[in-house]
Image (tube, rainbow, N blue to C red):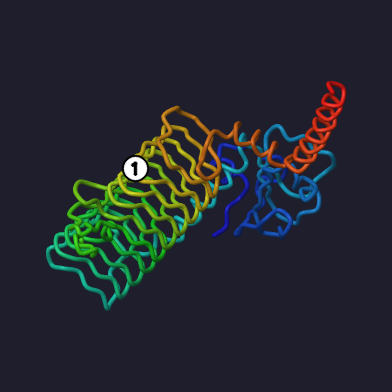
Amino acid sequence: MKFTASQIAIHINGKVEGDDSVSVNGFSKIEEGKNGDISFLANPKYEDHLYTTKASIVVVSHVLELREPVQSTLIRVSDPYASFAKLMRFYQNSLSTNLVGIEQPSFIHPTAKLGKDVYIAAFSYVGENVVIGDNVKIYPHCYLGNEVKVGNSTTFFAGVKIYNHCVVGNEVLIHAGTVIGSDGFGFAPQSNGSYKKVPQLGNVVVEDCVEIGANVCIDRATMGSTIIRKGTKLDNLVQIAHNVEVGDNTVVAAQAGISGSTKIGKQVTIGGQAGIVGHIHIADGTKINGQSGVSKSIRRENTIVTGSPAFDFSSSMRAQAVYRKLPELDKKIKELESLLEILHREREELSS
């Protein structure tokens, strides 16, 4: 599909600078742009590429002042990164709209209810009383257990598994290999030292506009629901345990783990490989640096923590500054100890 600069400008509310009839049919990084591509410039570090790129169209900031002439047609917008992402989403959606129908072999239980324009790929399984909304795309080898509910315009990529009774909202994107609703890690210790499994009778609720990366595991609740609130984004390889609640528009980077019954607030940022213990609260707007270990509740909103155990970011930075100086401080302490020893000897000599 081809789109002209004028058509693109209308879609992203931009202003064309150059030939508004030039057309593109592909995307590229600005340093790799070629004729027929559209690119963007958001980071000033890449501005030099603007004057050498062969991309036909480049999306730039409306405040950018050119140092020299450019060959490309420019589309000026308030936020080039967000505008380019919007274009890419539009293009991706246009490619997937033709995927409609049920491929064989696949199994769909007679009691399942399917909305309009649903796509179910081969080797997928849809269980009893499943409800699937309109425009849902289910790629090969997906499993939807009994009583699962799926909203409109949601996509499950290959190999996604949704266990019984779980709920997935509208416009949710779940990448390959993710498991929603597996048993929580609940075992009761016995007097003989063994462990007895505690039944996990709850479910998982994923609200609207959530994106979940590949190979993520979200455990079902022991009772009640594990909840991923609206707009949350989970990176690949994230583990979320039973009865956790993750607030609106929270972002969790790869390999982070959240232990059972912890409540994460709204707009929280959790860095990669961070670990959070169970049964605590994380306040709205908290930022947790990568590889941090959070062992107690964070009550104050917009707090930044780092380290393991994690503590206040500013205090941590000061502590690290002192830590780097420890060899120098150790040397000074030894020098002071030697000086004190000399002064002590001199004092004893004077007193005698």
Query: Which residue in the rendered view is the most extreme toward the left?
Result: 111
Q: Please provide percent x and percent y for residue 164.
A: 20, 60
Q: Please provide percent x and percent y for residue 267.
A: 45, 36
Query: Which residue in the rendered view is the most extreme toward the front?
Result: 352
Foreground pick, 325 / 286: 325
- Label 1 is placed on what type of residue? Thr
Which type of secondary structure does the marked residue at label 1 adopt? loop
Q: Is residue 15 visible?
A: no
Quadrant of res 79: top right
The residue located at (80%, 33%) in the rendering is 341
The residue located at (13%, 67%) in the rendering is 110
Q: Is residue 204 visible?
A: yes
Q: Is residue 270 left or right of residue 78?
A: left
Foreground pick, 236 / 72: 236
Q: How many marks?
A: 1
Q: Quadrant of the N terminus?
A: bottom right
Q: Please provide percent x and percent y for residue 165.
A: 19, 55
Q: Mark 1 sits on what residue?
A: 262
Query: Which residue in the rendered view is the most extreme toward the top?
Result: 351
